[in-house]
Image (spheres, grey):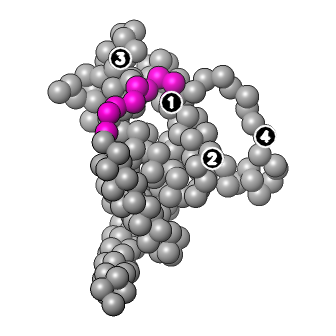
Protein backbone atom coordinates (compact mmCIF):
# COMPACT_ATOMS: atom_id res chain seq x y z
CA UNK A 1 0.00 0.00 0.00
CA UNK A 2 1.34 3.42 -0.96
CA UNK A 3 1.93 6.01 1.74
CA UNK A 4 0.02 9.29 1.77
CA UNK A 5 3.24 11.00 0.73
CA UNK A 6 3.64 8.66 -2.27
CA UNK A 7 0.06 9.39 -3.35
CA UNK A 8 0.64 13.13 -3.00
CA UNK A 9 3.77 12.87 -5.16
CA UNK A 10 1.79 10.88 -7.76
CA UNK A 11 -0.91 13.55 -7.85
CA UNK A 12 1.54 16.46 -8.03
CA UNK A 13 3.29 14.63 -10.91
CA UNK A 14 -0.02 14.63 -12.80
CA UNK A 15 -1.57 11.28 -11.85
CA UNK A 16 -5.17 11.91 -10.66
CA UNK A 17 -5.27 8.40 -9.17
CA UNK A 18 -3.10 9.63 -6.29
CA UNK A 19 -5.75 12.11 -5.22
CA UNK A 20 -8.61 9.67 -5.78
CA UNK A 21 -6.93 7.14 -3.48
CA UNK A 22 -6.29 9.78 -0.78
CA UNK A 23 -9.95 10.81 -0.90
CA UNK A 24 -11.13 7.20 -0.74
CA UNK A 25 -8.79 6.54 2.15
CA UNK A 26 -10.02 9.44 4.28
CA UNK A 27 -13.43 10.52 3.00
CA UNK A 28 -15.40 8.80 5.78
CA UNK A 29 -13.33 10.32 8.58
CA UNK A 30 -13.25 13.80 7.08
CA UNK A 31 -16.91 13.87 6.05
CA UNK A 32 -18.02 12.54 9.46
CA UNK A 33 -15.91 15.10 11.32
CA UNK A 34 -17.56 17.88 9.28
CA UNK A 35 -21.06 16.42 9.60
CA UNK A 36 -20.81 16.07 13.38
CA UNK A 37 -20.00 19.78 13.61
CA UNK A 38 -22.59 21.15 11.16
CA UNK A 39 -25.34 18.50 11.60
CA UNK A 40 -26.56 18.99 8.04
CA UNK A 41 -25.88 16.43 5.31
CA UNK A 42 -25.92 18.87 2.37
CA UNK A 43 -23.84 21.50 4.16
CA UNK A 44 -21.36 18.79 5.20
CA UNK A 45 -21.04 17.69 1.55
CA UNK A 46 -20.45 21.30 0.46
CA UNK A 47 -17.76 21.84 3.09
CA UNK A 48 -16.21 18.46 2.24
CA UNK A 49 -15.96 19.54 -1.41
CA UNK A 50 -14.58 22.97 -0.44
CA UNK A 51 -12.00 21.22 1.74
CA UNK A 52 -10.73 19.13 -1.16
CA UNK A 53 -10.78 22.09 -3.53
CA UNK A 54 -8.43 23.82 -1.05
CA UNK A 55 -6.32 20.64 -0.82
CA UNK A 56 -6.11 20.42 -4.62
CA UNK A 57 -5.17 24.09 -4.97
CA UNK A 58 -2.49 23.79 -2.28
CA UNK A 59 -1.02 20.62 -3.80
CA UNK A 60 -1.04 22.08 -7.34
CA UNK A 61 0.66 25.25 -6.10
CA UNK A 62 3.39 23.10 -4.52
CA UNK A 63 2.68 24.59 -1.07
CA UNK A 64 2.00 21.33 0.81
CA UNK A 65 4.74 20.64 3.35
CA UNK A 66 3.07 18.59 6.09
CA UNK A 67 5.23 15.48 5.65
CA UNK A 68 3.35 12.45 6.95
CA UNK A 69 0.50 14.54 8.37
CA UNK A 70 -2.00 14.53 5.52
CA UNK A 71 -5.14 13.63 7.52
CA UNK A 72 -4.56 16.13 10.36
CA UNK A 73 -3.77 18.82 7.75
CA UNK A 74 -6.99 18.13 5.80
CA UNK A 75 -8.98 17.99 9.06
CA UNK A 76 -7.60 21.41 10.04
CA UNK A 77 -8.68 22.81 6.67
CA UNK A 78 -12.17 21.31 7.11
CA UNK A 79 -12.43 22.63 10.68
CA UNK A 80 -11.42 26.12 9.56
CA UNK A 81 -14.01 26.02 6.76
CA UNK A 82 -16.70 25.02 9.30
CA UNK A 83 -15.69 27.97 11.50
CA UNK A 84 -15.73 30.27 8.46
CA UNK A 85 -19.21 29.00 7.58
CA UNK A 86 -20.58 29.77 11.03
CA UNK A 87 -18.95 33.21 11.02
CA UNK A 88 -20.46 33.97 7.58
CA UNK A 89 -23.84 32.63 8.64
CA UNK A 90 -23.95 35.18 11.45
CA UNK A 91 -23.21 38.04 9.02
CA UNK A 92 -24.81 37.11 5.70
CA UNK A 93 -27.21 34.55 4.27
CA UNK A 94 -25.64 31.46 2.71
CA UNK A 95 -25.19 31.84 -1.06
CA UNK A 96 -24.63 28.80 -3.29
CA UNK A 97 -21.37 29.11 -5.21
CA UNK A 98 -22.78 27.23 -8.17
CA UNK A 99 -19.57 25.30 -8.81
CA UNK A 100 -20.00 22.34 -11.15
CA UNK A 101 -17.18 20.45 -9.43
CA UNK A 102 -18.46 17.53 -7.36
CA UNK A 103 -15.83 15.54 -5.47
CA UNK A 104 -18.29 12.63 -5.14
CA UNK A 105 -18.25 12.21 -8.95
CA UNK A 106 -14.56 11.29 -8.70
CA UNK A 107 -15.25 8.46 -6.30
CA UNK A 108 -16.41 4.99 -7.27
CA UNK A 109 -18.84 3.05 -5.12
CA UNK A 110 -17.58 -0.11 -3.48
CA UNK A 111 -19.75 -3.18 -2.99
CA UNK A 112 -21.17 -3.76 0.46
CA UNK A 113 -23.88 -6.20 1.48
CA UNK A 114 -27.23 -4.73 2.47
CA UNK A 115 -26.91 -6.21 5.95
CA UNK A 116 -23.40 -4.77 6.45
CA UNK A 117 -24.59 -1.38 5.25
CA UNK A 118 -27.62 -1.43 7.58
CA UNK A 119 -25.51 -2.40 10.61
CA UNK A 120 -22.90 0.23 9.77
CA UNK A 121 -25.52 2.94 9.26
CA UNK A 122 -27.33 2.10 12.52
CA UNK A 123 -24.07 2.04 14.47
CA UNK A 124 -23.03 5.40 13.00
CA UNK A 125 -26.48 6.82 13.68
CA UNK A 126 -26.38 5.68 17.32
CA UNK A 127 -22.86 7.01 17.85
CA UNK A 128 -23.64 10.34 16.16
CA UNK A 129 -26.73 10.73 18.35
CA UNK A 130 -24.63 10.20 21.49
CA UNK A 131 -21.85 12.51 20.27
CA UNK A 132 -24.43 15.25 19.59
CA UNK A 133 -25.39 15.12 23.28
CA UNK A 134 -21.87 16.06 24.40
CA UNK A 135 -21.05 19.67 25.34
CA UNK A 136 -19.64 21.58 22.34
CA UNK A 137 -16.02 21.74 23.60
CA UNK A 138 -15.92 17.99 24.31
CA UNK A 139 -17.54 17.14 20.98
CA UNK A 140 -15.05 19.31 19.08
CA UNK A 141 -11.97 17.67 20.68
CA UNK A 142 -13.39 14.17 20.21
CA UNK A 143 -14.08 14.78 16.53
CA UNK A 144 -10.66 16.30 15.83
CA UNK A 145 -8.84 13.54 17.70
CA UNK A 146 -10.81 10.51 16.50
CA UNK A 147 -11.97 11.49 13.03
CA UNK A 148 -9.15 13.89 12.20
CA UNK A 149 -6.23 11.99 13.78
CA UNK A 150 -4.99 15.29 15.16
CA UNK A 151 -2.49 15.35 18.01
CA UNK A 152 -3.50 17.07 21.24
CA UNK A 153 -0.98 19.78 20.45
CA UNK A 154 -2.64 20.38 17.06
CA UNK A 155 -6.08 20.38 18.73
CA UNK A 156 -4.86 22.84 21.36
CA UNK A 157 -3.48 25.13 18.63
CA UNK A 158 -6.66 25.02 16.51
CA UNK A 159 -9.01 25.55 19.47
CA UNK A 160 -6.72 28.08 21.17
CA UNK A 161 -6.52 26.25 24.52
CA UNK A 162 -3.71 24.55 26.46
CA UNK A 163 -2.81 20.92 25.78
CA UNK A 164 -4.01 20.04 29.31
CA UNK A 165 -7.40 21.62 28.59
CA UNK A 166 -7.68 19.65 25.32
CA UNK A 167 -6.73 16.42 27.15
CA UNK A 168 -9.25 17.15 29.89
CA UNK A 169 -12.03 17.79 27.39
CA UNK A 170 -11.24 14.49 25.67
CA UNK A 171 -11.26 12.60 28.97
CA UNK A 172 -14.65 14.13 29.90
CA UNK A 173 -16.03 13.38 26.42
CA UNK A 174 -15.02 9.71 26.62
CA UNK A 175 -16.35 9.36 30.17
CA UNK A 176 -19.65 10.96 29.15
CA UNK A 177 -19.96 8.72 26.08
CA UNK A 178 -19.21 5.64 28.19
CA UNK A 179 -21.92 6.62 30.71
CA UNK A 180 -24.43 7.29 27.93
CA UNK A 181 -23.68 3.93 26.29
CA UNK A 182 -24.06 2.10 29.61
CA UNK A 183 -27.39 3.79 30.34
CA UNK A 184 -28.57 2.99 26.79
CA UNK A 185 -27.65 -0.69 27.27
CA UNK A 186 -29.50 -0.75 30.60
CA UNK A 187 -32.61 0.78 29.03
CA UNK A 188 -32.49 -1.79 26.20
CA UNK A 189 -32.30 -4.70 28.67
CA UNK A 190 -35.35 -3.55 30.65
Going from N to C along the chain, the mark reached first, 4 or 3, is 3
Instruction: Name the secondary structure under disc 3.
Output: helix
Residue 116 or residue 74, whichever sits in front: 116
The answer to whether residue 166 is above or below residue 17 is below
Outermost residue, top direction? 14
The numbered disc on residue 95 is 4
Query: Depth-wise, is mark 1 or mark 4 nearer the camera?
Result: 1
Q: Find disc 3 in the rendering and name its residue.
A: 17
Query: In the image, is residue 47 above or below residue 160?
Result: above
Regarding mark 4 in the picture, which secondary structure is present there? loop
Span of residues in magenta: 104-112
Element carrying mark 1: helix
What separation in Å lies between label 1 and label 3 (alpha carbons)? 14 Å
Residue 104 marker: 1
Q: Which x, y percent locates residue 167?
A: 33, 70
Question: Dot 4, how many residues are within 10 Å of its Cα: few (below 14), some (14-19), or many (20+)?
Answer: few
Of the two numbered discs 1 and 3 in the rendering, the one whose residue sits closer to the viewer: 1
Q: Secondary structure at mark 2?
A: helix
Measured along the vertical axis of the image, is residue 187 above or below residue 104?
A: below
Q: Quadrant of the C terminus?
A: bottom left
Front one among 64 and 25: 25
Amino acid sequence: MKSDQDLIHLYVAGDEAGLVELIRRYQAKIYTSIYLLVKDEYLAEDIFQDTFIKVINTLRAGKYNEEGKFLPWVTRIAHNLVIDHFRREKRTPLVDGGDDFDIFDVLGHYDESTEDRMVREQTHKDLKALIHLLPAEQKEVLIMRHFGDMSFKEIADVTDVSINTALGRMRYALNNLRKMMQSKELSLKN
